[in-house]
Amino acid sequence: MNDARPASRLLTVSQAINEGLRIEMRRNPEVLLIGEDIGALGGIFGVTKGLLEEFGPERVLEPPIAEYGFTGLAVGAAMRGLRPVVELMFSDFVSVAMDPILNQAAKMRYMSGGRFSVPLVLRAPRGSGDHYAGQHSQCLEAWFTHIPGLKVVCPSTPADAKGLIQSAVRDPDPVIFLEHKLTYNREGNVPADDAPIPLGSADIKRSGRDLTIICWSRQMFFALEAAAELAAAGIEAEVLDLRSLVPLDWAAIKESVGKTRRVLIVEEAARRGGFGAELSAQVNEEFYGALAAPVKRLAGKNVVIPFSPGLEEAAIPQVKDIVEAARAACPR
């Protein structure tokens, strides 16, 4: 029998992003990379290995340790027609580059009356779990979702990471692309063809009828483990991986929540002011009166991420926490 589906390979998230960047750099000579140690070293997590050798130092730029400066440079380059992909060593370091991102890149299309666009991608490792402590372990996606003009992507699987980075590079607007550092070595099947995944498209990673678990990034894997455990207890949870926070796939949320009528939102970021709070508000506003139970949120503690492995684990939702919260949302 002839199988027309494209071939796939087993890649890690790191390898998949590398492949996506390589495709886009070959496809468009205006795509260039900017970041500390992304050349010979291949970046602190090895995502850009081999790209300097193929594309040379004019397209793989290694600036000094000056995030404000080289992010501002990238905004200007994007306004002049290039498509820079900036890598920050850790997403926490965005705090020293907020002006060019929030006040320039995000607003330029509007402030210029559409004369300029900023096709910029800012890649950054996010999240805890590897004992990098408080200044290297934060999840800051809520910062960016609050700013009109920015798009925000949080992939989980290798296939998603490759397809979404391709769409991010092709997008005419600035995209914040947040990769969880503990997913870089996760393996999964990745299509061998050039297959971008549209921004704003969520993905049902597991179907269910009793509860919708809305999640993104590394928490998706925790949610899948929890869903398997819940199924053994007779609770069929649907795992909805948002993948893209801005734009948000509201149609997928609406379809899933309309079916299950129960919602658990799971995020690693601190609970106070997190993106989960915004989702909870939107779901409650849309489905008020139709939900079988109030929306539940499970998020990180409102603490600085500790260095201690035991304390770090206690600070963010684990599989057992998701199972417990799901059981509370689905009383038997």
Image (cartoon, rainbow, N blue to C red):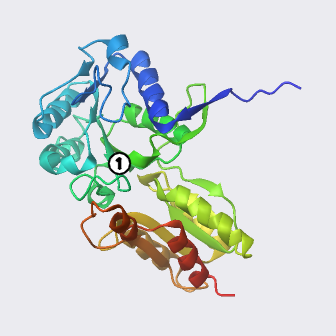
Image point (25%, 24%), residue name? 81
The residue carrying pointer 1 sits among few (fewer than 14), some (14 to 19) or many (20 or more) residues within 10 Å by Cα, namely many
Kindly identify which residue carries mark 1.
Answer: 151
Across the whole image, how many numbered discs are drawn on residues?
1
The quarter in which the C terminus is drawn is: bottom right
| Residue 165 pos. (x, y %) | 43, 36
Image point (20%, 47%), residue name? 94
| Residue 216 pos. (x, y %) | 47, 56
**Farthest residue, direction right:** 1
Q: Is residue 297 visible?
A: yes
Name the residue nearer the viewer: 159 or 308: 308
Name the residue nearer the viewer: 23 or 110: 23
**Left or right: 249 with respect to 305?**
right
Name the residue nearer the viewer: 38 or 215: 38
Q: Is residue 241 visible?
A: no
Seen in the picture, residue 188 relative to 98 is either above or below; the reply is above
Q: Secondary structure at mark 1?
A: strand
Which picture quadrant has residue 115? top left
